Image: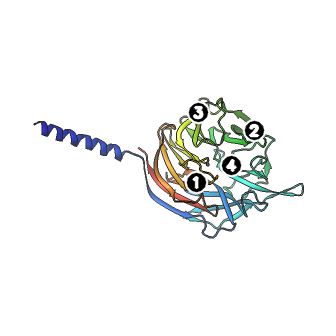
Amino acid sequence: MISKFYSILLFVLISITCTSQKQNTQAYNIRNNFITEKPITTNSHAATLVEIKPNEIMAAWFGGSYEGAKDVGIYFSNYKNKTWSAPQNLIKPLIKEKDTLACWNPVLFKAKSKTLYLFYKVGKNPREWFGAMITSKDDGTTWSNPEYLPEGILGPIKNKPIEATPGVILCGSSTESVEKNEWRSHVETYTEATGKWEKINIENNQNFDIIQPTFLMHSDKNIQMLFRSKHNILITSWSQDSGQSWSQTDSINVVNSNSGIDALSLSKKSFLVVNNPLKQGKDWFNGRNVLDVEHSKDGIHWNKIFDLEYQPEGEFSYPAIIQTSDKKVHVLYTYNRKYIKHVSFDVNWK
């Protein structure tokens, strides 16, 4: 009788375990390709993407001889019916005061007003660059002339903005100081109706070196940011007033190799982050040979879903992630500085 009781108990426990495992977040229908297998520049990096029409995507990145070279401009491609268009140059390097300045870190964003924005940086390096943007009213068919942002305003530094309040674009930004090599993050807001920019400080009492914020929406008022840091872990900060103030800046137990990340809110209680989950090695690129997708229900505790890349060496970095109208998730990232790789998948997060 006792033996039978324990057999039944064991069966129940196994059934509960299997049910629990089935409820774990899973990715399926995983597809991957390069935007182009014949890049038109030697170096390609820092991709961004946005849904311009239902299930149609525009991507942009910077390309040239090498990062910071005088021939580095912004390039783009469109994705429709599972096919990428041939890449084209969109923005050329800026000639200013008899010098030629490279373009950096494009960021695409389509506002609720239907205006499509392309934010980017111009300059010799990330310590001296300045912000710029162009806009489109026809989903990227035509664009405005470049507009250079006010002094001290950089726009979204790497990752897509959010629009918690209609007409107010919330941008995660950051600076890298020339003298002390400090990394500091802040938030910038752009009000479409007035064209006014404002800067919002982030509480950072522990003096974390943090850059390149990405947003998670827990509610219209409760917003979280995740940051790249110099500390081999991700840092987070919170706002309870739709991004107007930020506090509770602290580390979370997610290893990162001092590399760019991006995050996505699937719902108010389900989130993805694309991350290089290794500690940084001797050289800046060490630890970028593994790139994964992780899931969380609270923005604090994260579990890996699957690896986008897991190789003995190489650089797979600077991801960008969105979800299109058909609920498919799309990720772009740098592949050994030569290609921009695209991975799409469905996700079961219930």
Residue placed under numbered mark 4 in the picture: 115
Q: Residues within 10 Å of mark 3 (few under 14, many from 20)?
A: some
Mark positioned earlier in the residue sequence (2 or 4) = 4
- Label 3's element? strand
Instruction: Determine the residue positioned at 61% across, 67% down.
Output: 36
From the viewer's side, name the closer residue of 329 and 152: 152
- Label 1's element? loop
Q: CA distance from mark 2 to mark 4?
A: 17 Å
Is any atom of residue 52 visible in this view? Answer: no
Q: CA distance from mark 2 to mark 3?
A: 27 Å
Q: Residues within 10 Å of mark 4 (few under 14, many from 20)?
A: some
Q: Nearer the viewer, mark 1 or mark 2?
A: 1
Q: Position of residue 301 (x, y in %)?
A: 48, 38
Check if mark 1's residue and mark 2's residue have beta carbons within 8 Å.
Answer: no
The three-letter code of the residue at mark 4 reads Thr
Q: CA distance from mark 3 to mark 1?
A: 23 Å
Q: Nearer the viewer, mark 3 or mark 4?
A: 3
Check if mark 3's residue and mark 1's residue have beta carbons within 8 Å.
Answer: no
Residue placed under numbered mark 3 in the picture: 250
The three-letter code of the residue at mark 2 reads Trp
Q: Which mark is residue 288?
A: 1
Q: Which mark is residue 197?
A: 2
Q: Quadrant of residue 225?
A: top right
Can you say which quadrant of the picture contains the N terminus? top left
Is any atom of residue 29 visible in this view? Answer: yes
Q: CA distance from mark 3 to mark 4?
A: 35 Å
Q: CA distance from mark 1 to mark 4?
A: 35 Å
27 over 195 or under it: above or below: below
Q: Nearer the viewer, mark 2 or mark 4?
A: 2
From the viewer's side, name the closer residue of 237 and 194: 237
Mark positioned earlier in the residue sequence (1 or 4) = 4
